[in-house]
Structure formats: C-alpha cells, structure tokens
Amino acid sequence: MRIFKEATFEAAHRLPHVPPAHRCHNLHGHNYRVRIECEGPLDPKLGWVCDFADVDAAMAPILKQVDHRFLNEVPGLENPTSEVIAAWILARLRASAIPAASVTVWENDTCGAIAE
C-alpha cells in the first residue's frame, strides 16, 4: 500500500550549467510543492503504512535546509534542477525510518520531477 504527504517550500536558484542565454541561468525563485509517497504493508493493528506525523517529522529538517534559501548554496544542490532536488530529498528520507518510495517535486503547476 502507498500513502502520500505533501509539503511546500519557497526558494531561489539558478541553473549554472545551462547556456547564459537560457532563462534559468538567471537567479529566480519557485514555490515548490513536494509529494512524499511511502510504501509498505498495512499495519493490522494501527491501520496505516506509517504515521503522517512521522513523515512530517522526517521532512522538517529537510525543509529547514531549503525553505527561503538560495538552493545553489545547499550542499548537494549546487545544480538545483527539479530532478536533483527530488533525488536529494528522497535520499535524506531513505536515511530516516520513513519507508519512502518516491518524491515528486513541482517547481510550478505544470512541471516537475519524480525520484524513485
């Protein structure tokens, strides 16, 4: 079974490896939306895969590192594409006790990336 929890953060970034004429080469910001999917067996007693509060607790230090920050200065996010951000968050969640299966990061309403 899979569950999901969503979070948001606001941050600025620039993509240093695109050509200078590319619009994302310039400093700009996004209102990011993150969807964390956790997968595992349904606990027969508790009736859940994991506690949503535990997902929130695991996400709190991650969000603190990126919310209202310049992402290029965050270790591991020197080239902060949506793909890199999703993989970065997923790696940190997997280092916790959360059974994270995937992380989706939207940088706007119409595009984003999924790390599994």
Image (tube, rainbow, N blue to C red):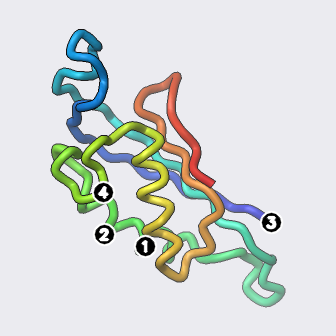
Q: Which residue is mark 3?
A: 1
Residue sitting at x 16%, y 50%: 73
Q: Are marks 2 and 3 in contact (CB under 8 Å)?
A: no
Q: Which residue is mark 2?
A: 61
Q: Quadrant of residue 11?
A: top left
Work out how far the residue at label 3 is from the one at label 1, CA to CA, in angstroms. 20 Å
SS at badge 3: loop
Q: Amino acid at mark 2?
A: Pro
Work out how far the residue at label 2 is from the one at label 3, CA to CA, in angstroms. 26 Å
Foreground disc of the pair 4, 1: 4
SS at badge 4: loop
Image coordinates of residue 14 in percent, x first then y, are 23, 31
Work out how far the residue at label 4 is from the one at label 3, CA to CA, in angstroms. 31 Å
Q: Which residue is mark 4?
A: 76
Work out how far the residue at label 4 is from the one at label 1, CA to CA, in angstroms. 18 Å
Few, some or many C-alpha atoms within 10 Å of disc 2 (few <14, some 14-19, many ≥20)?
few
Q: Quadrant of residue 89?
A: bottom left
Q: Amino acid at mark 1?
A: Ala
